[in-house]
Image (tube, rainbow, N blue to C red):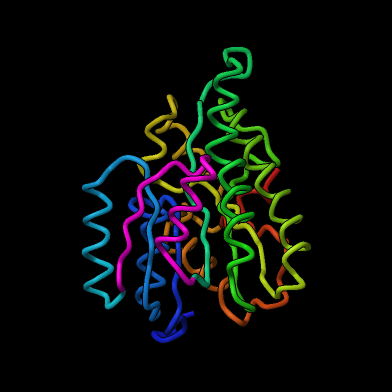
């Protein structure tokens, strides 16, 4: 989808939008005509400011929103700052990367709150504000249905995200608001720095992916923009897998 006016007049919120996949998604909406692009972030003011400058250069009004999305009162404040909103992309994610037997309850609370609870809060508060034709899109991963090394809690949180998408898709359908998820294969971003076996993972995924390359942020942005478009109006509660065929190989 390359229509430079596809999202003209629209306001988009991308959580985790200052870096990596979220940044690419935010910039893609700006390139396709979105009037206002809000990026939610938690830590790096510098990265958010740099992304905001690029958004402005592309013709979109940037809104930089710092806050913890697991905090419902802060989410409500952020949504009030954005005002009228058409599309929500729940991309922000974090988690403790350890084997199951090395995890503690506090790791569970942190990871599930940051990923699954944040989507629950965001969709619960933003969904009723979206107009007919609005869209909520969450980012998931293959760890929701496959066992990946050290990925226990993040994988569980992603499975919860995919379940939440299904429930919100049904409850928001009478408003003609859609909810879907995009499950990405391995993408080489700074998020991989938290994995102790980063280089081995990259080699493994490259060798096992039928498409012959890793998934790139642009591939994810393409899919997110499609799901947010009118062309995807009858796709609801689904998780689209974008992995170059990796999950097909036994």
Q: Is residue 233 left or right of residue 84?
A: right
Q: Is residue 46 left or right of residue 61?
A: left
Q: Is residue 232 left or right of residue 67?
A: right
Residue at 69% in and 42% down: 160
Residue 39 shows up from this direction? yes
Residues in magenta? 61-84
Position in image of residue 10 (x %, y %): 45, 78
For the image shown, how many numbered marks are present on the structure? 0
Q: Is residue 31 left or right of residue 58?
A: right
Q: Is residue 237 above or below residue 187?
A: below
Q: Is residue 148 above or below residue 45?
A: above
**Residue 114 within the magenta-colored segment of the rendering:** no
Quarter of the image where one finds residue 39 = bottom left
Position in image of residue 161 (x %, y %): 65, 47
Position in image of residue 135 (x %, y %): 60, 69
Residue at 56% in and 41% down: 115
Depth check: give the residue in front, 86 or 242: 86
Position in image of residue 5 (x %, y %): 41, 86
**Residue 82 within the magenta-colored segment of the rendering:** yes
Residue at 66% in and 33% down: 147
Quarter of the image where one finds residue 130 = bottom right
């Amino acid at each position: 989808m390359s229509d430079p006016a596809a999202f003209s007049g629209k306001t988009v919120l991308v959580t985790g939008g200052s870096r990596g996949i979220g940044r690419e998604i935010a910039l893609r909406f700006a390139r396709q005509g979105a009037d206002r692009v809000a990026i939610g972030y938690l830590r790096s003011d510098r990265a958010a400011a740099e992304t905001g400058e690029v958004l402005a250069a592309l013709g979109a009004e940037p809104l930089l929103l710092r806050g913890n999305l697991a905090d419902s009162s802060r989410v409500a404040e952020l949504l009030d700052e954005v005002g009228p909103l058409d599309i929500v992309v729940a991309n922000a994610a974090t988690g403790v990367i350890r084997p199951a037997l090395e995890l503690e309850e506090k790791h569970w609370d942190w990871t599930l709150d940051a990923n699954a609870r944040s989507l629950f809060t965001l969709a619960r508060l933003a969904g009723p504000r979206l107009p007919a034709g609005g869209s909520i899109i969450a980012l998931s991963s293959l760890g929701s249905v496959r066992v990946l090394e050290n990925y226990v809690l993040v994988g569980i949180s992603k499975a919860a995200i995919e379940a939440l998408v299904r429930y919100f898709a049904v409850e928001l359908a009478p408003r003609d608001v859609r909810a879907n998820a995009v499950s990405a294969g391995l993408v080489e971003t700074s998020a991989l720095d938290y994995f102790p076996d980063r280089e081995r993972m990259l080699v493994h995924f490259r060798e096992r992916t039928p498409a012959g390359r890793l998934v790139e942020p642009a591939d994810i942005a393409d899919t997110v923009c499609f799901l947010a478009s009118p062309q995807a109006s009858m796709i609801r509660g689904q998780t689209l897998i974008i992995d170059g065929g990796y999950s097909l190989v036994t």
